[in-house]
Amino acid sequence: MKISLIGPSYPFRGGISLNTTLLFRALKVKHEVEFYSFSRQYPKWLFPGKDDEEREFSLLKEEKAQRIIDSLNPYTWIKVFFKIRKNQSEVLI
């Protein structure tokens, strides 16, 4: 089954990014999965003195995640839409 997964991926901070990355790894065992993630989630001013990424557990970083969605640039949302349509995914998560 062709699946497209959209969400934050590790190394972004928080439980959602961690669990989305683990979901991708579980799904790709039996399915063809495309993982679209964020290149930027928030403006830099929300993280003064640091950023929104963790660097502690580098083994959790998913190299196959396509980090192309910029939350501040709607053009990238359209770009992902066309990639999903071209891929002919059966399921969108």
Image (cartoon, grey):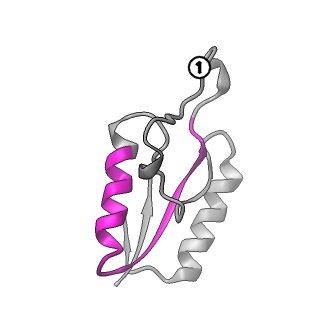
* Rendered-image quadrant of the C terminus: bottom left
Q: Residue at 53%, 34% (x, y): give it.
A: 53
Camera-side residue of 81 and 60: 60
Look at the picture and state if 21 lies above or below 29.
above
Q: How many marks?
A: 1
**Label 1 belongs to which residue?**
46
Q: x, y (%) of residue 66? A: 58, 61
Q: x, y (%) of residue 59? A: 43, 51
Q: Residue at 37%, 63% (x, y): give it.
A: 24
Q: Residue at 54%, 73% (x, y): give it.
A: 84
Residue 23 sits inside the magenta stretch: yes
Q: Which residues are magenta?
A: 18-41
Q: x, y (%) of residue 30? A: 29, 81
Look at the picture and state if 26 lies above or below 21.
below
Look at the picture and state if 66 lies above or below 49.
below
Q: Secondary structure at mark 1?
A: helix
